[in-house]
Amino acid sequence: MESINRILMLPEFVSRGVKLLVSFLKKIFRRDEFGVSWWESKRLERSPKLAHTHAHLLGRRITLTDASWYLFSYREIFKEEIYRFNIDSPSPLIIDCGANIGLSLIYFKHLYPDARIVAFEPDGEIFGILEQNIKTFHFKNITLYAKAVWTSETELSFQPDGAVGGRLTQDGAINVKTLRLKNFINQKVDFLKIDIEGAEYEVLKDCKDYLGNVDHLFVEHHGNQNAEENLNEILQIIRNAGFRYYLKEASPVKHPFIRQERGVLYPLQLNIFAFRN
């Protein structure tokens, strides 16, 4: 009798199992509002560091230089929307210093499809991926420069890292050409992003007389342990330009009193959000 009851209940058990399986499959393959699935996120979490791979974003396939950096940046830029700003114009002028593979540009175009964007990325290999990713979306009104922003037009030593941390330095592996950012902000700029791995102080100091043309300013401050801390000077430049600002830790440190945990190169990384009243 017990065996018969088991047989009679089998279809219900199978049906329940199929429903659970379907629900599980929907979960792992369902994409969020930006086209990223749970399954793909898990694949990227297991990807080797500094290995080129791909991901889907807003219905397009983009190329990545480092999966862990991409996942962090995707959450920061698209999910948390740290670059979100409001403006009446449908075609704001955005200048992006440190565009990397283009995630910020893709976000800006998602936010304002008619935005006019000028972007800089000095790492030649990453610039090629940036160009490829932007072409994938068929964006218009984007001008890309394979150069670093600096205080003059010259050629400087640059140390690439294959992902996101390439920087101007005295003993870099390659030389890159630079452009003077000041020459690009002699007009109204709706959003200026400066994420240039430690060169932000010199560039801001050179641009200080023109920062009044900028409505929204984002600066990622990189406090270099081998150089004098200049955060106070950066904030003073921003205040003198008429901005108010909000500070947010960019790279949290769990135990700041322990030297090994403060970061090898940048013991202090802050996101500075500067805006008008």
Image (cartoon, rainbow, N blue to C red):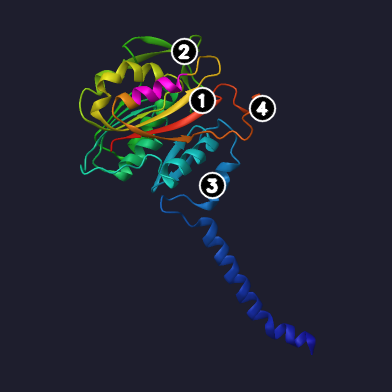
CB within 8 Å, label 3 to label 2: no
In magenta segment, residue 195: no
Judging by the rendered image, the residue that carries numbered circle 3 is 41
Q: Earlier in the sequence, mark 1 or mark 2?
A: 1
122 or 227, nearer to the observer? 227
N-term mark: 3 or 4 = 3
Q: Determine if the magenta segment contains residue 232.
A: yes
Label 2's element? strand
In this view, 211 is above or below 172: below
- How many angstroms separate mark 3 from mark 4 (CA)? 32 Å
Q: Residue furthest bottom?
A: 1
Label 1 to label 3: alpha-carbon separation: 21 Å
* Kind of residue indicated by mark 1: Gly
Marks 1 and 2 close (CB-CB < 8 Å): no
Identified at 55% across, 66% down, the residue is: 22
Q: In what quadrant of the picture does the N terminus appear?
A: bottom right
Q: Amino acid at mark 4?
A: Ile
Which region of the structure is painted magenta? 230-238
SS for callout 4 = loop
Q: Mark 1 packing: few (<14 Cα in 10 Å), some, or many (20+)?
A: some
Q: Is residue 9 left or right of residue 57?
A: right
The residue singled out by tag 2 in the image is: 174
- Earlier along the polypeptide chain: callout 1 or callout 3? 3
Disc 4 designates what residue?
258
Residue kind at label 2, given as amino acid type: Ile
Measuring 51% from the left and 41% from the top, which residue is drawn there? 71
Q: Residue at x 69, y 86 (%)?
A: 8
